[in-house]
Image (tube, rainbow, N blue to C red):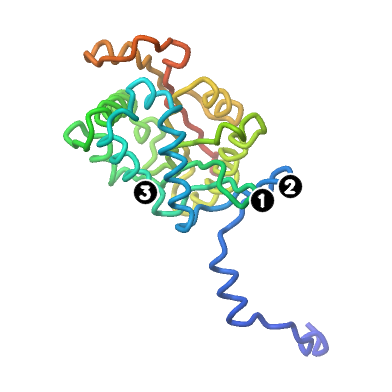
Amino acid sequence: MSKKKQDITIEEETDEDFMTRITQPRIWTTFKSDFLFQVFTDERMDEILDMFKNNYIHEESLCVYNELSSDQDSVDQFLYLVKHWISDTLSTIVIEKSSGRSVGIIICRFCSIEENSLEFSRLRLYEGEKWNIIQNFRSHLSQKFNIYQYYKSTAFFRVYAWFILPSFRNQGLGKKLLDCVITKQLPEMMHFGCNLISGIFTNKKSQEIAKSLGLTTLYKANYIEWANQNNINLPDNISDENSIVRVMGYKINQE
């Protein structure tokens, strides 16, 4: 490099500029110029909890089948777990630019084989009868399919919940959320020895979107059949339309 180039001064970043930059939420992408996809931050916690309390538990298949909203202990336990799941800030939210509010979220966490023993253990009891039923089913899936053994992996990126507010659906936001995880976050997880994403997808729509982005079915179960076998009382008016629950996964090839 010439002496002349070395002498060229570049405007230095001030301490204030630096602090502003590093404290801003990380933005993965802008979608249709109307929505931002960014990393969850703590100041959004109450907003996200309201989304789960007022919308998610009334629409997500397992919550509806088990009438989770009728059991306050189960609702409280679920919301407590949501706060725990998103505490590591690996989740992504959708922000409507015009209003500044959150309209969707995908909750993800880095999971390792070392911490796997308690998560879906039948020995672990939660508050709330309805939530324990849901967790027992998830434990059943975990016992039927061991993702660590199947992929010969010691860690994976788990999808815990994935939701778009009803009035913002059919615009591709849900698909873009999962795509951000697969194409933006998961490659970064490879630095920690994690090149795998998996989750439990409980309805046809989410399963179709996941499949379109490369996830494959690793194990499937009929929730109504499992509930009947385990003497779980279900509402009379539920149908088989979304009774198939799928464990799905995707692995990035490491070269």
Would residue 11 be found to the left or right of residue 154 on screen? right
Would residue 8 be found to the left or right of residue 29 on screen? right
Q: Which mark is residue 97?
A: 1
Q: Amino acid at mark 3?
A: Lys
What residue sits right under mark 3 in the picture?
83
Hey, which residue is sitting farthest left in the picture?
123
Q: CA distance from mark 1 to mark 3?
A: 24 Å
Q: Return the residue nearer the eye: 173 or 244.
A: 173
Picture coordinates of residue 240 (x, y %)?
Answer: 43, 10
Q: Amino acid at mark 2?
A: Ser
Mark 2 or mark 1, which has the lower sequence index? 2
Q: Which mark is residue 58?
A: none
Q: Identify the residue at horizontal 65%, vertical 80% (top origin).
A: 13
Which quarter of the figure is the C terminus placed in?
top right
Q: Identify the residue at horizontal 45%, vertical 54% (top origin).
A: 89
**Mark 1, mark 3: which one is toward the viewer?**
1
Q: Identify the residue at horizontal 49%, vertical 36% (top origin).
A: 162
